[in-house]
């Protein structure tokens, strides 16, 4: 069973490394120079609130794909990018 866990951990690490963006703007899915400067500023969200928002968005992504296993990291990363865009651009 340990071999499977090690393989899964290595796979997860390689997914994170492959998805690491070149910049913060790229991490948020924003083209260089397009930082939503015209968007109204929102009140800051706490780290815990942001985590909860990401968890909720990831849950709904998983629900849309009928909770098929193997895509949890993608769900989280896509939800994180979505929430960060919403918090940055309104």
Image: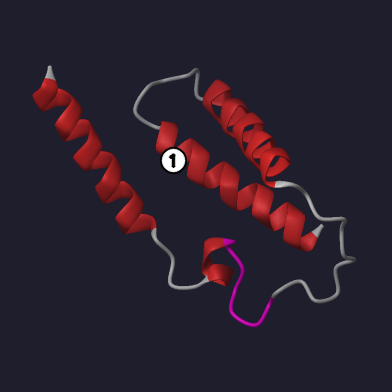
Q: How is the image coloured?
A: secondary structure
**Residue 52 image offset from top left, x and y in percent:** 67, 34
Above-or-below relation of 10 to 64: below
Name the one closer to the observer, 64 or 53. Answer: 53
- Residue 69 appears left or right of 5: right
Above-or-below relation of 32 to 28: below
Query: Residue at (31%, 48%) from the top-left corner?
Result: 15
Q: Residues within 10 Å of mark 1 (few under 14, many from 20)?
A: some
Query: Residue at (68%, 77%) from the top-left corner?
Result: 34
- Residue 71 appears left or right of 34: left
Name the one closer to the observer, 47 or 1. Answer: 47
**Residue 55 image offset from top left, x and y in percent:** 60, 32
Which residues make up the magenta segment?
28-34
Q: Which residue is mark 1?
A: 74
Q: Secondary structure at mark 1?
A: helix
The chief SS type of the magenta part is: loop
Above-or-below relation of 18 to 58: below
Does the magenta run of residues contain 54? no
- Residue 78 appears left or right of 37: left
């Amino acid at each position: 069973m340990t071999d499977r866990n090690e393989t899964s951990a290595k796979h997860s690490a390689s997914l994170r490394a492959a998805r690491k963006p070149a910049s913060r703007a790229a991490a948020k899915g924003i083209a260089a120079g397009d930082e939503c400067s015209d968007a109204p500023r929102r009140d800051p969200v706490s780290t815990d609130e942001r985590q909860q928002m990401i968890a909720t968005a990831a849950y709904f992504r998983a629900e849309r794909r009928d909770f098929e296993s193997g895509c949890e990291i993608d769900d989280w990363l896509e939800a994180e990018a979505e929430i960060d865009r919403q918090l940055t651009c309104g």
